[in-house]
Image (cartoon, rainbow, N blue to C red):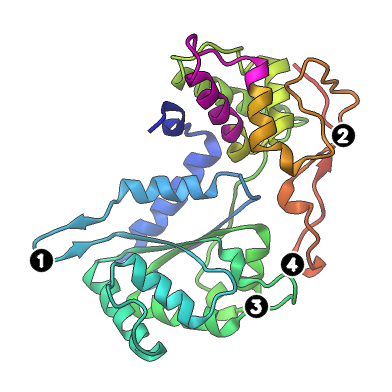
Amino acid sequence: MDCSERVLVKYPLFTTAVRRIQECFDSYGTTAEPACCPIVGESGSGKTTIISYFAHLHPRVDHKWGTEQPVLLAKIPARPTVKSLAETLLYKLGDPLWSRGNTVSKSIRLRELLKQCHVRLLALDEFQHFVDVRQANIPNDVADWLKEQVEEAKLAIVVLGLERCLEVLRQNEQLRRRFGANVRVGAFRWENKEERTVYRAFLRAVQEQLSEFTMPVLSDVEMAFRMHYGSFGLIGYTMKIIRGAARLASSRPLREITLETLAQSYAVNVWAERLDCPNPFLDDFDPDKAPPVKIPSRTTAVDPRMHGRHYSTRVELHA
């Protein structure tokens, strides 16, 4: 794996989210109803990285007596049905007959496999797929089915998704009762001094893990501002830009990441989503004339009942 793909920085929100997931995990078998937690945030805020890291801490192990899988991590299929969700979970548990049988038989097999594999935590990514934004519709039959399965197996649950996934819990009282407070991960706001400081510290830590490359000091105010503007302040987009630049630099003798390299990476990996915005890594980039930052997942037209207000802010350069 490319060295840039191995970069992992445990910034404060990352550690907070992992700690909360660990609390849910530890509640299995120790409480009448294991803890459940929603983790919500914009696309690119690092939710999938967080839960993948936690699953890596508790890997699947093959014993002589069978398979132990403490964390079952699965993505909710688009427009889920009971059939498609059951098949997804069976497949992730290694059932070779995951597509066989009717809904009842699949549900029974799933419950047995959850017990046999000693699953303690069910982590469901892309939970917003429960919400059909075009019809403002939520498949409550699927949510009810999911509740029945986890209650039968007495599992802890973590769901991850965009803000609108909370609508599933708001509309399903029995499912909502199982969940505690939300953990929100999102974009770093440049105009907030504390968040700006954390974002610059994040860039410094990334650069330390890429010591084999020569590059500008990413945590310097001007450079950090360019990175923030190009990435919306989101961890996922920040790393897309840096990893893209590292791949370009790897093919060159000096392994040097320059503004030009970052500009090329931005153009390939991010610019398609920001056609109206200037490339912040070009020499003629002017922060004072740049359009305000808009988070991608909040610029798509959705039903207002499912979404908050658009996030838009004019960013200014600060020390």
* 41 sits to left or right of 210: right
Per the image, the residue denoted by label 3 is 138
Amino acid type shown at disc 3: Ile
Give the mark, 2 or 4, whose residue is nearer the N terminus.
2
Q: Residues within 10 Å of mark 4 (few under 14, many from 20)?
A: some
The image's mark for residue 291 is: 2
Q: Which residue: 81% across, 60% down?
A: 301
Along the line of sight, which residue is nearer the eye, 28 or 153? 153
Q: Does the stretch in magenta take in 85?
A: no
- Decide: is 241 above or below 129: above
* Badge 2 vs badge 4, beta-carbon distance below 8 Å: no
| Residues drawn in magenta | 239-261
Along the line of sight, which residue is nearer the eye, 249 or 4? 249
Label 4, secondary structure: give it. Answer: helix
Residue 71 is situated, as x and y percent measured from the top left of the image, at 34, 59
Residue 277 is situated, as x and y percent measured from the top left of the image, at 82, 35
* 88 sits to left or right of 300: left
Amino acid type shown at disc 1: Trp
- Image quarter for residue 276? top right
Per the image, the residue denoted by label 4 is 306
Amino acid type shown at disc 2: Pro
Task: Give the distance between the C-alpha atoms of the residues marked 3 and 1, in whole angstroms.
Answer: 40 Å
The image's mark for residue 65 is: 1
Does the rendering let one see residue 195? no
Q: Which residue: 42% across, 77% down?
A: 86
Where the C terminus falls, by quadrant?
Answer: top right
Give the mark, 1 or 2, whose residue is nearer the N terminus.
1
Task: Give the distance between the C-alpha atoms of the residues marked 1 and 4, in whole angstroms.
Answer: 46 Å
Residue 291 is situated, as x and y percent measured from the top left of the image, at 87, 34
Give the mark, 3 or 1, whose residue is nearer the N terminus.
1
Along the line of sight, which residue is nearer the eye, 263 or 148? 263
Q: Does the stretch in magenta take in 244?
A: yes
